[in-house]
Amino acid sequence: MEEQTVVLIVGAGPAGLTTVACLTQLSIPYVIVEREDCSTSLWRNRAYDRLKLHLAKEFCELPHMSYPTDAPTYIPKDQFVKYLDNYIERFNIRPKYQTAIESCSYDKVRKCWFGMARDMRTSVVVRYMAKFLVVASGENSAANIPMIPGLHEFAGEAIHSSRYKSGTYSGKNVLVVGCGNSGMEIAYDLASHGANTSIVVRSPVHVMTKEIIRLGMTLVQHIPINIVDDLLVRMSDFVFGDLSRHGIVKPKLGPLLLKAKTSRSAVIDVGTVGLIKDGAIKVLGNISKIKGNTVEFEGGKENAFDAIVFATGYKSTANTWLKGANGLYCAGLAKRGLAGIAMDAKIIANDILSSYHSYT
Ligand SMILES: Cc1cc2nc3c(=O)[nH]c(=O)nc-3n(C[C@H](O)[C@H](O)[C@H](O)COP(=O)(O)OP(=O)(O)OC[C@H]3O[C@@H](n4cnc5c(N)ncnc54)[C@H](O)[C@@H]3O)c2cc1C
Ligand SMILES: *[C@@H]1O[C@H](CO)[C@@H](O)[C@H](O)[C@H]1NC(C)=O
Ligand SMILES: *[C@@H]1O[C@H](CO)[C@@H](O)[C@H](O)[C@H]1NC(C)=O
């Protein structure tokens, strides 16, 4: 089977949906495919219950549709999903669900992309022919779990943060690996649901409040980044005090500069720091190996755990199916979150519009 279209979009997350909305505004035909049976599966199925957008809503708005005026400053995940559902309805987006792209390559002779998509229900493969390809398959496509000697023989339960929902570990000894936003918030959730919680902090990290970050993101539009960073670090010191004696060390670069240069975000505290100071959450160093139920840390310390939650991030999988370059666009792969996605989508649609005219 073969289908022809102008633009083939891979992935119906925020980036794919936004790109489609922008293409629709410009009346450019497209097909959007999604491997799961719903849109925005990351937010619907692979996020913990208490998740809210980390950034204030003014930094997370997608093109052509505002959040409802009564929406809270920090949008809870269910409300974000509802916003995207409204987006789908408003722009009449009909993703082809359970359709996974298995390979995509550019045909230099015919000057077009061929995408092989498998219908997961019937196993039938459809070949899409398109002038343009938009890779919107996300930076969170596959779970990233570090290689730790003995992990596959761990006697407890080991899960990735994408499978963590809430609270089922009451009375258990649980270790969270990773101190990004997910790790810190999951540690808080575990501890407040009665788990004996420890967290592995492997590298330096800035801890901020969401208000400090919001202020920083606003100020940096007018004031040099190093001055804003300096202010943010002072404010954070004032709010949290010196966290180094609790095992949390600050990076040398300031929070906004670090984000711009390395895409490592500051952690926005949801109450975890208070629990660490109380001793309710214990901070541990790097893991060296695992034996049965026992986790051994660098320096020789060891503790037994019932479960380990790996909040160690994700990786993109587009490299496994993508080949070629002409007429190729990537939406949402520059580690700039929803603000980056909003920008990518508009630029892509406009760029396609200008070269589309030369094809028609
Ligand atoms: C816990 C968590 C919290 C976050 N909070 C924020 C926040 O507060 N603010 C912010 O700006 N960003 C946040 N982010 C970043 C987040 O990545 C983006 O907000 C957003 O979800 C990314 O959208 P996307 O469309 O690029 O990718 P995704 O949402 O991952 O969507 C990609 C889609 O492509 C599909 N797909 C992948 N491969 C294929 C294939 N081969 N064939 C067909 N379909 C495929 C996937 O199933 C998926 O539905 C957060 C991320 C996580 C994990
Ligand atoms: C809680 O976890 C810490 C760190 O792993 C451990 O030292 C302590 O013994 C645990 N407490 C209980 C009651 O199991
Ligand atoms: C943990 O290991 C990483 C590299 O794997 C290293 O960069 C870091 O300094 C280590 N952290 C501690 C606290 O030993």
Image (cartoon, grey):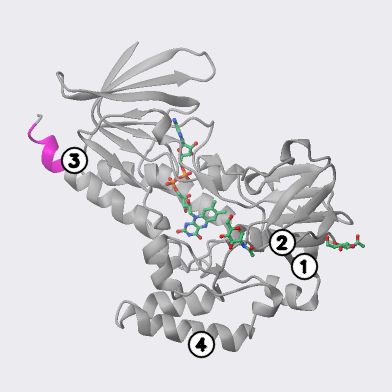
Where disc 1 sits, the SS reads: strand
- Furthest-left residue in this view: 358
**Other-residue count near label 3 (Cα within 10 Å), few / some / many at <14 / 14–19 / ≥20:** many
Contact between labelled residues 1 and 2, with CB atoms less than 8 Å apart: yes
Q: Pick whichever, 63 or 284, lies toward us.
A: 284
**Residue at 58% from the left image edge and 45% from the top image edge:** 44
The Cα atoms of the two marked residues, 3 and 2, are separated by 46 Å
**Disc on res. 199:** 2
Tell me if 290 is positioned left or right of 4 in this view: right
The Cα atoms of the two marked residues, 1 and 4, are separated by 25 Å
In the image, the segment drawn in magenta is 353-358
Residue bearing mark 4:
234
The Cα atoms of the two marked residues, 1 and 3, are separated by 52 Å
Q: Main SS type for the magenta part?
A: helix
Mark 3 or 2: the one toward you: 2
Residue type at mark 4? Arg
